Amino acid sequence: MPENIKIALLINPSRWYTRGILGGIAEYARLQGLWTFYRPLEYREAKAGQQLVEVLKTLRPDGIFMREPPQARAIINMGIPTVCFPYSRETIEGVVNVVTDHEAVGRMTADHLLSLGLSHFAYCGFDDWWWSRRRRDSFCAKVSEVGFEADVYRLPGPKSERTWDKELPHIVNWLRHLPKPVGVMACNDDRGELVIEACKMEGLKVPDEVAVVGVDNDALICDLCSPRLSSVAWTLEKGGYEAAESLDRMIKGQEKDRPTLWIHPTHIVARQSTDVLAMEDLEVAAALRVIRCCGFLNIGVQQVVERTGLSRRALEQRFRKTLGCSIHDEIERVRLELTTQMLAKTQKSVGEIARTLGFPDAAHVSRFFRKAKGISPMMYRRQCQI
């Protein structure tokens, strides 16, 4: 009978991001059935973190998953197959790295806020973290492409001013001077929660004056916010599963290279913090509500026009002036968003998705999706799901 494979799991499960990754690792372990995990529990083993290298030498694990402990280089030098999920730098030499697509998340968030009809934008993150700067730069670049600028929050100089309670007044002051209504991208959900709390202190209405989007889709944090926070979801479970596959191959001597694996954003989980159509043109706002409420009904341009008091030509002109796209473009965008969510989060077949969204058949969905995304629906699903 084969022996169990010992895996050191040096990943704190307190965060939604890491719990998603751990869920993917656990799924792979269940399927192959031979892994035993060691997790240092500092509340039971007070010196486990301080003496991690010594503990690992005694344990002699077959493989290691780690976030990025202070002893990372010493652990790598032990020569044990290792997969790392770095956060203080892009990649770490000598291991398989699992990195997140920060540029894509910035663009996705900008697209979401732009679709609300906003013309003022801002970013609240951490100047001193490279991943936050990456998200900031891609967000600002996307906003700039359509002729707008994004105001960027700057951290207080003294580190003593960066605690939750002391930084809150700085964010309040920043929000106070932003033009309204404004769409704010927060670098993660914690930051999004802080922005919403700052809005409460200043008496700013969310989402009417300040629409807020976070990142990570941490359900607990998003639900603690009032109003509940919209947020970007990731392919966390798939990232964890692929990391486990790679570690298994390394342990078996089947993978000599050290590839870089990716975690991609899938979609934005829209909640009350962005439930707004921030535009002065009430007819365009009414048309947008129809499109978004009837996305499952395969609604056409003429049906949208009939719900307003304008002619088709007049509504098209005002639509382009307000949103920079046609009515048909917005209908297609909403249908693509719904298709994307169903592929990422459900097990519905392409045929079932076609019937749900009013496409003639699965072939139409495939052509529609491939034209927009550049890949087939099933390929996209494989990228998102285990």
Image (spheres, rainbow, N blue to C red):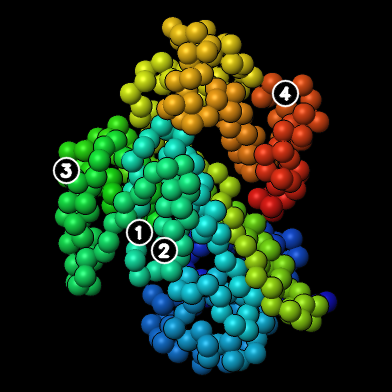
Q: Residue at x 21, y 42 (%)?
A: 200
Q: Nearer the viewer, mark 2 or mark 3?
A: 2
Q: Position of residue 336 (x, y in %)?
A: 62, 34
> In 3D space, how far apart are the residues under numbered discs 2 and 4 (Cα atoms)?
40 Å
Q: Position of residue 275 (x, y in %)?
A: 39, 31
Q: Give the residue type that dot 2 points to.
A: Arg
Q: Residue at x 63, y 84 (%)?
A: 94
For the residues bearing labels 1 and 3, Cβ distance under 8 angstroms: no
User: Are there few (<14), some (14-19), or many (20+) residues within 10 Å of tag 3?
Assistant: some
Q: Is residue 213 above or below residue 7?
A: above
> In 3D space, how far apart are the residues under numbered discs 4 and 3 (Cα atoms)?
47 Å
Q: Residue 229 bears which disc, if any?
A: none
User: Are there few (<14), some (14-19), or many (20+) residues within 10 Å of tag 2?
Assistant: some
For the residues bearing labels 1 and 2, Cβ distance under 8 angstroms: yes
Check disc 4 and report its element: helix, strand or loop. Answer: loop
> In 3D space, how far apart are the residues under numbered discs 1 and 2 (Cα atoms)?
8 Å
Q: Give the residue type that dot 1 points to.
A: Gly
Q: In the rendered image, which quarter contains the N terminus?
A: bottom right
The residue that mark 1 highlights is 125
The residue that mark 3 highlights is 202
Q: Position of residue 222 (x, y in %)?
A: 39, 46
> In 3D space, how far apart are the residues under numbered discs 4 and 1 (Cα atoms)?
40 Å
Q: Give the residue type that dot 4 points to.
A: Phe
Check disc 2 and report its element: helix, strand or loop. Answer: helix
